[in-house]
Image: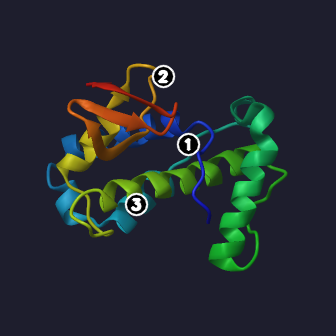
Amino acid sequence: MSKTTFYKIDEVKEYTKDRLEESLEYNPNYLDENDVHDIHHQLFNEDYYIIGTWKAEQWLGSKAFEVIGIIKEYEEDQFGEVYTVLSNPEMVVNMYVYIVGESILYDMASQNDGTSDNLNKDSLKVLKKVCKKCNGYGWTSDTTLKGFKYCDSCNKTGKVKQ
């Protein structure tokens, strides 16, 4: 799947952060006991992100066809065909969030120690960095200037607020 800026990625990152923090409150060893594949499954496949057709339609808004295109590309790449019922807004939103969640978690894992199968508590710091200009979470790991980073969400260089 091609690298893209996902619709509502900041919202899904916030959801990811909240779910990871909940899991760590329940089990402080959660990140040590699960690899990124298991964590992705638990966060995005064991529960629904959105329940209800109306709520899903509102969430999709004018981006429904863009989201459907991302799902089609992902499923054709992964499975050779599309399994999501694309006429069901609730299924579309939940599959889309599954895909975005996978991208978020694998990006987090790759920023740790070069491996793609492990998360650690430093991984959560990536989700907590917020751009002061756009309030987005799209910070790259490369520091461009002392105390500054580049934000993928708004394409600006700026200070990070915690």
Q: Which residue is mark 3?
A: 106
Residue 49's tag is 1
Report whether residue 57 is seen: no
Q: CA distance from mark 1 to mark 3?
A: 19 Å
Q: CA distance from mark 2 to mark 3?
A: 23 Å
* Residue shown at 71% from the left, 44% from the top: 90
Contact between marks 1 and 3 (CB within 8 A): the answer is no
The kind of residue on which mark 2 rests is Cys
Left or right side of 88 for 25: left
The kind of residue on which mark 1 rests is Tyr
Say which element carries label 3.
helix
Give the x, y percent position of residue 82: 76, 69
Check the image and name the residue furthest to the front.
145
* Residue shown at 80% from the left, 55% from the top: 86
Give the x, y percent position of residue 155: 51, 34
Q: Is residue 37 above or below residue 45?
A: below
Say which element carries label 2.
loop
Check the image and name the residue furthest to the top.
133
Q: Is residue 11 above or below residue 95?
A: above
Task: Report the colour scheme.
Answer: rainbow
